[in-house]
Image: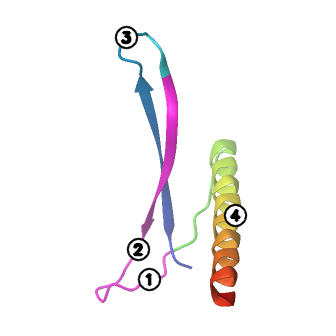
Amino acid sequence: MTLHCFSGVPAKARAQRASFVGWVASAYFVFVAIDADGNARPVPPLAPETEAEVRRMREAEIRRAHRLARKQEIEAVRSRS
């Protein structure tokens, strides 16, 4: 198993002449364990312990599945061109 560690990062904006502060974007950084040659390396599997950790892990699995499906669809369109 290769570790892909995700860290969520929210971005907020404030209108210059108003007190409005709103969420404008969010992102997930991905950290991958690598060896001395720069290749992904195996690490022990994650074991979520709390309900929140289990939920976040499941959400990450869903995001990954969607990202990979999008990537495959884009590659399929490109291969037909």
Between the C-alphas of marks 4 and 1, the distance is: 24 Å
Position of residue 81 relative to residue 31, above or below, is below
Position of residue 73 relative to residue 22, above or below, is below
Left-right relation of 36 to 46? left
Which span of residues is magenta-colored?
22-43
Q: Of tags 3 and 2, which is closer to the observer? A: 3
Between the C-alphas of marks 1 and 3, the distance is: 50 Å
Q: Secondary structure at mark 2?
A: loop
User: Upstream in the sequence, badge 1 or badge 3?
Assistant: 3
Q: Secondary structure at mark 3?
A: loop
User: Upstream in the sequence, badge 2 or badge 1?
Assistant: 2
The reply to whether callout 2 and callout 1 are in contact (CB within 8 Å) is: yes
Instruction: Give me the residue at 67% from left, 62% from top.
Output: 61
Q: Of tags 4 and 1, which is closer to the observer? A: 4
The residue that label 1 is drawn on is: 41
Mark number displayed over residue 66 = 4
